[in-house]
Amino acid sequence: MERVIFTGKVLHYRQTGVDCKLRFSHRGRAGQRQACVREFGFMASPDGTMYRCSRSSGLGGAAGKLRLTAVWVLLLIRMGVWGESVVDSGSKANPPEPNRVVLQVLRTVSDGGGYSVSSSAFSALRGAVRSQGGSNGEWVADAAKPSFCSGATYVVFLRALQRLVPDQVRGEPMLRALMVRGQPDGTGVWGRWNANGPGTAVLFLDAGLGMNFEQLEKAEPGDFLKIFWNDGVGANERGHSVVYLGRGGTGESEEIQFWSSNQPSGYGSKWVPLSRVRRLLFSRLERPENIRRILEIPVADSYLGRLSAGHSDWAELERRLWGKGGGGGGKK
């Protein structure tokens, strides 16, 4: 087993045959992130192991050969899952099965493609849903380029459903319900997912897909996440739809990592200081088989619909998700 020591955060690894490709990121003196990629002949934990590493003083070679040590490393665990290695140390050793599938889907998406909210990006998203024989659909994330955040996470959501409950996402009625056709905010599945405020969370609540919660301590890699950069809910909000990957650092230097379509490059993972984040709203896919319920829920949600041009606040958001008194306690 080759060991590698470095300074920084493990962004991710990709399995390549029997080897693993680890991508590292560290801050230079100018504060810029620099990345280096190496391949190693050992298996690293894909479940969210926290690495704490330092640069070796005796490394040779022009590029500085890297060797790896870790405070605690779980090896030989479920290879084939996207392995984010800097996460909340309180996470369970193995994320829930739907979360692992979400992370697997991320491994199939090529980085880049550019970020855009133009009409061409929406056209690309619509084209990412391909019909197979009229009754089956295939969601191809790489076809949705350039991309934007909610479109990126929506395709990942659909791909995860297709892997978890393939029989539930077949048939013309279901395909029509899941397709992107320019639905306004709050209307249909895509219109809920893409809405301002708690769009994805409302979809999970109404269809019984899983729980919504606000506490970072409860988060697991593979949770869907709406980041609020300000206190606004509605037309005045600044938000980002992402897949949560983990957290690192402590105190003022604490950061969270996520995958989405990010400016300016498009698909990929990113670290941001937690101090930049105003609020977090997680949605965990727990009961994917309930996706059939989307054919039974009301076509439009009036609350989400008015957030397209109107304003709300966090208290109303909590009442919508958790009833009188709100609380964000992770209620299902």
Image (cartoon, rainbow, N blue to C red):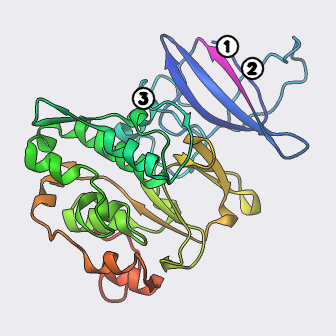
Q: Position of residue 92 (x, y in %)?
A: 45, 47
Residue where numbered disc 2 is placed: 67
Residue 186: which numbered mark, if any?
none
Amino acid carrying mark 2 in the image: Arg
Q: Position of residue 163 (x, y in %)?
A: 25, 35
The local secondary structure at tag 1 comes to loop
Residue 38 covered by magenta stretch:
yes
Amino acid carrying mark 3 in the image: Thr
The local secondary structure at tag 3 comes to loop
**Image height check: is 275 above or below 323?**
above
On screen, residue 282 versus residue 132, left or right, reads right
Task: State the separation of the CA atoms marked 3 and 2.
Answer: 28 Å
Residue 290 covered by magenta stretch:
no
* First reached walking from the N terminus: tag 1 or tag 3: 1
Residue where numbered disc 3 is placed: 108
Residue where numbered disc 1 is placed: 2
Q: Are marks 2 and 1 in contact (CB under 8 Å)?
A: yes
Instruction: Give the total number of marks visible in the rendering.
Output: 3
